[in-house]
Structure formats: structure tokens, C-alpha cells
Image (cartoon, grey):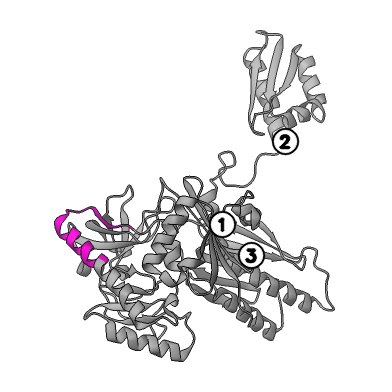
């Protein structure tokens, strides 16, 4: 398998910092952070249980943010740790029967929690008592006495070496996860990482002793050092930063925590903007579009709703092969690769339903699922294919941590309120005519002129296709109706006034 050329681009000229991850020149991951609106995932708080809700086996916890945090019973007792797909060495979590929420928590109780999901929409942040403290090579598990190894490390000899190191250095009654970045790293370097995260944890505990709830005990790193900590590994050829200040900070951070890779961080000072140089701006625009075209002429349509994300696969301008089955297979395989990339790029989470083109051959269906699974394996977020129906519908889930790219960079249309549709010209024109008639019925003799202010397209409709109706009203009521186009009017907005 040929080695992928992986680059990290950091655009940090304004209060908005943007991170692009490229693989062979193609945008595969994108992150954004506004300096006055940092996320809270990863933050650790001393909270207070406000209310127990037995019906859903959960509790509301005050952590000092605007919306009360939500703590499920399984997040209060479970050992299902999943740090970016970095699971325990057996690849599974233990299945245990959960106690009731009343047995685990009580109202007024102080509790240490970590935010696992950002507040989204009307929902508050989701928290867990299974705290993780991440370093570059390790993740410390203060509440779980187990060893985990990233499943992205596939070499069995390397896994065994790292497991032995973890067993040797693991503090008593603590757990450790060996991260992907630890592959090939010496025991000495891994021990340094452990010393750092233990210091962070012990400092956090000291704060917890002295502060009443709610209190922020640990805030995760800003986006640039966090990106270096989590993403700067041996397979990254370079990190380009277009801000001199952020570049210098990044180099200092890397020299302190990842010295062997610090030289891969470079300052980008060319006249052509960094994201334009590498085609990232255009790629972001495409990532905000519903429709994504495939190289073979087919296309996929991605729709995010409150309940789930639906993805429809279409043949488009694909040149058909010998049979319908071959055509469907070729389009579906191309779509599977693009869907996996789009989920990762758009950071879409929750329930996802993919409507592939229907195929009859079981071997073809198997090949499609294998292709989708292979492509999803590149994703750092946890994904799971649940099933494939006889109609070609694939149900899957992807771990949701924060807002998707679309919800981060866009807002619900204030005109259509998320419906994605507005009233037709005909509908608005008929509404205008009804309002004119209503005005004339109330005060038929008060004025000689009626003025209609409307969007230019609606105004044109009224003076062309609906001209005969307007003239009939003028004749019936002996009035003059003047239609005035207003450029800035939304298509559904109009005003009927007496002149």
C-alpha cells in the first residue's frame, strides 16, 4: 500500500482559527474555533447534582454553564472508554448490568465530571464521571484500572511491546490508553508523557478540594496545541501555519512535548492565502452543499435533520455498463468511499441512513459493506454499521461529540426556517390579490390608488401572468393599482398600502 501524504494547514489570521487536514491533497478533516466561543468538550468540572430523573435513568448536573449538563447512569458507572477509537486491548468493553440512577447518585451530591458532548440545539452538554486526561502518547484513566491500546496500531509485535511498557509504568489503581502516536516510541518518551498528565490530574484534584461546585477544574487546550497533541504523528509530513504568532507558539509547544516532530512545523508566508493555495476554500464550499458529485458522474445528496442524517445515492450522468447490477455496484462503491470522507469532513454524528442503489446480488452487497467499513476505518470517530435492508438501505451510527461542520458554519435560514423551501411566485401573487380585495372591501371609497410593494419576481408575476386579474379589480372598484418592485424584499414579503 502506498504511503499517504498527510498535511495539516492552520489558518489563524483572525479570531477564527481554522484547521485543515489533507491526505494526498484532498481535504479529509476540518476544524474551526472562534476565540470568544471555545468548545467545552474535554473540560473537567466539579458539579452538583440538581435533579434525578428515574424515567430516563439520568441526572441533571450544574457545572456552571448556561444549560444544565446531562449525566446518564451508564456514563456514571460504565467502563466503555473510547478515546478516538482507541479501545481496550480486547477491542470490547465489559458488559455489566447497570444499577439504577438512584443507587449511583443523589440530589445535592458533588461529582467530578468531564464533558463528552457539546450542547446541541436545546440539549445541554452530556457529561461522564469516567474522566480521561489526554497526553500525546497516552490517555490517563483515573477511575478505571485497565490498559487499552489504540486499535489503529495493527502490528501485533508493536501492540505487545506497548502493552508491556504500559503494564510497567502504569500507576497503581489507574488505567492507561496507549494512543496511536505512541507507535515506535521509546519507553522513556512515553514515561515523560505520563509524568506530565499525572501532574495535570493531581493539580486538578487539588483545585477540586478547595473550590465549591460548580467549578471549572481543567480546560482542554486551545485548538492549535490540541491539534498538535492529537494529530501530529509520524505520518504527517508537514504542518503549515500562516500566522507568525501561532507558528512560534506551536513550535514552543512541540519542542516541549513532541520534540522529534517540531521541525515539521513551518511558517507559511506567501502572498497567496494558505487555504487558497491548497484549494481548501473551494473544498469547504463543497462540504456545505447538499449535493456531492462522484468522479464517475453519479452523485450523493446529504440531508441533516433533527432525528437523523439521510444520504441518497443517485446515478446522475453515469455511463451505464452492460447490466443494471454492474451499474449499481460501480456507483455504490464510489459513493461508499465518498460518503466515508464526507462524514469525516463534515463531522456528522448520530444515526445515519444511506440509500444505496438497489442491488440483487448478495456478493455485491457484501463487497459494498466491506468497502464502506474499510473507508470508515480511516475515521478517528467511532462508527458502526448496524444493518443493510433488502432495499439497499444501510443504517449506521457515528459518534457525535459536537456540532457538524454545516451547523458550525451556517445557521437555519431565517426565511424558510430550515424547510429548504419558500412559497412559489404564484402563491405570493394570490396572497397579494386577496389582501388588495380585503382592503377594498373594508374602505372601498377612501382612495384612488393602491400601491403594492413586492419582490421584483413577484412584481413581474403580478404585472404579466396576473395582469388580467389586477385589471379586473381596477375596473370593478374604479381604482388604480400600482405595483412597485423592491430589490431587498424577501420573495414572501409584500406590503399593500393606500396611495
Of labels 1 and 2, the one closer to you: 1
Instruction: Quadrant for the C terminus, please.
Output: top right
Of labels 1 and 3, the one closer to you: 3
Q: Residue at x 55, y 39 (%)?
A: 414
Between 253 and 321, the one lying in front of the other is 253
**Residue at mark 3:** 26
* Residue 130 seen in render: no
Of labels 3 and 2, the one closer to you: 3
Q: Which one is earlier in the sequence, the residue at label 3 or at label 2?
A: 3
- For the residue labelled by badge 2, is the local secondary structure a helix, a strand or a loop? helix
**Residue at mark 1:** 304
Q: Which one is earlier in the sequence, the residue at label 1 or at label 2?
A: 1
Q: Measuring from the top left, give residue 265's x and y in whole percent.
A: 50, 63
| The disc label shown at residue 425, or none | 2
Q: Measuring from the top left, give residue 276's x and y in whole percent.
A: 64, 52
84 with respect to 375 (left or right)? left
As measured in the structure, the alpha-carbon distance from the residue carrying label 3 to the one carrying label 2 is 41 Å
Disc 2 residue crowd, few under 14, some 14–19, many 20+, Cα 10 Å: some
Q: Which one is earlier in the sequence, the residue at label 1 or at label 3?
A: 3
Q: Residue at x 69, y 25 (%)?
A: 486
Disc 1 residue crowd, few under 14, some 14–19, many 20+, Cα 10 Å: some
Magenta residue span: 200-219
Q: Residue at x 66, y 82 (%)?
A: 367
357 with respect to 131 (left or right)? right
Q: Measuring from the top left, give residue 471's x and y in whole percent.
A: 80, 20
- For the residue labelled by badge 3, is the local secondary structure a helix, a strand or a loop? strand
Q: Measuring from the top left, give residue 456's x and y in whole percent.
A: 73, 29
- Residue 205 magenta: yes
As measured in the structure, the alpha-carbon distance from the residue carrying label 1 to the one carrying label 2 is 27 Å
- Count of marks overlaid on the render: 3
Amino acid at each position: 500500500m502506498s504511503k499517504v501524504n498527510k498535511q495539516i494547514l492552520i489558518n489563524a489570521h483572525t479570531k477564527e482559527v481554522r484547521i485543515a487536514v489533507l491526505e494526498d491533497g484532498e481535504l479529509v478533516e476540518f476544524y474551526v474555533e472562534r476565540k470568544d466561543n471555545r468548545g467545552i468538550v474535554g473540560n473537567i468540572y466539579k458539579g452538583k447534582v440538581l435533579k434525578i430523573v428515574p424515567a430516563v435513568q439520568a441526572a441533571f448536573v450544574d457545572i456552571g454553564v448556561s444549560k444544565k449538563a446531562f449525566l446518564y447512569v451508564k456514563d456514571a458507572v460504565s467502563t466503555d472508554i473510547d478515546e478516538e477509537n482507541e479501545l481496550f486491548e480486547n477491542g470490547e468493553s465489559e458488559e455489566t448490568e447497570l444499577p439504577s440512577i438512584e443507587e449511583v447518585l443523589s440530589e445535592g451530591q458533588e461529582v467530578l465530571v468531564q464533558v463528552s458532548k457539546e450542547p446541541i440545539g436545546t440539549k445541554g452538554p452530556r457529561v461522564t464521571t469516567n474522566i480521561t486526561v489526554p497526553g500525546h502518547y497516552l490517555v490517563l484513566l483515573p477511575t478505571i484500572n485497565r490498559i487499552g491500546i489504540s486499535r489503529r496500531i495493527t502490528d501485533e509485535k508493536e501492540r505487545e511491546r506497548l502493552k508491556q511498557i504500559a503494564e510497567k509504568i502504569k500507576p497503581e489503581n489507574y488505567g492507561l490508553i496507549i494512543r496511536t502516536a505512541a507507535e515506535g516510541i521509546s519507553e522513556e518518551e512515553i514515561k515523560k508523557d505520563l509524568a506530565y498528565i499525572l501532574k495535570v490530574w493531581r493539580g486538578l484534584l487539588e483545585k477540586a478540594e478547595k473550590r465549591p461546585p460548580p467549578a471549572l477544574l481543567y480546560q482542554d487546550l486551545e485548538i492549535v496545541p490540541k491539534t498538535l497533541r492529537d494529530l501530529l504523528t509520524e505520518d504527517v509530513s508537514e504542518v503549515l501555519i500562516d500566522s507568525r504568532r501561532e507558528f512560534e507558539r506551536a513550535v514552543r509547544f512541540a519542542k516541549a512535548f513532541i520534540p522529534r516532530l517540531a521541525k515539521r512545523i513551518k511558517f507559511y508566508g506567501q502572498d497567496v492565502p494558505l487555504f487558497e493555495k491548497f484549494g481548501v476554500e473551494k473544498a469547504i464550499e463543497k462540504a456545505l452543499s447538499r449535493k456531492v458529485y462522484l468522479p464517475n458522474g453519479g452523485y450523493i445528496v446529504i440531508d441533516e435533520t433533527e432525528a437523523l442524517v439521510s444520504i441518497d445515492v443517485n446515478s446522475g450522468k453515469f455511463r451505464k455498463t452492460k447490466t443494471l447490477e454492474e451499474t449499481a455496484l460501480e456507483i455504490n462503491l464510489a459513493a461508499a468511499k465518498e460518503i466515508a470522507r464526507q462524514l469525516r469532513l463534515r463531522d456528522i454524528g448520530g444515526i445515519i441512513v444511506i440509500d444505496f442503489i438497489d442491488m440483487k446480488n448478495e456478493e455485491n452487497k457484501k463487497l459494498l459493506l466491506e468497502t464502506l467499513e474499510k473507508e470508515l476505518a480511516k475515521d478517528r470517530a467511532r462508527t458502526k454499521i448496524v444493518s443493510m435492508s433488502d432495499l439497499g438501505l444501510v443504517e449506521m451510527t457515528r459518534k457525535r461529540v459536537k456540532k457538524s461542520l454545516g451547523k458550525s458554519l451556517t445557521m437555519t435560514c431565517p426565511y424558510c426556517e430550515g424547510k429548504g423551501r419558500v412559497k412559489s411566485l404564484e402563491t405570493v401573487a394570490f396572497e397579494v390579490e386577496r389582501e388588495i380585495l380585503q382592503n377594498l372591501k373594508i374602505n372601498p371609497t377612501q382612495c384612488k390608488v393602491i400601491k403594492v410593494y413586492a419582490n421584483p419576481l413577484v412584481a413581474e408575476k403580478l404585472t404579466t401572468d396576473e395582469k388580467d386579474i389586477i385589471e379586473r379589480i381596477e375596473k370593478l372598484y374604479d381604482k388604480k393599482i400600482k405595483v412597485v418592485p423592491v430589490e431587498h424584499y424577501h420573495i414572501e414579503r409584500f406590503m399593500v398600502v393606500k396611495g
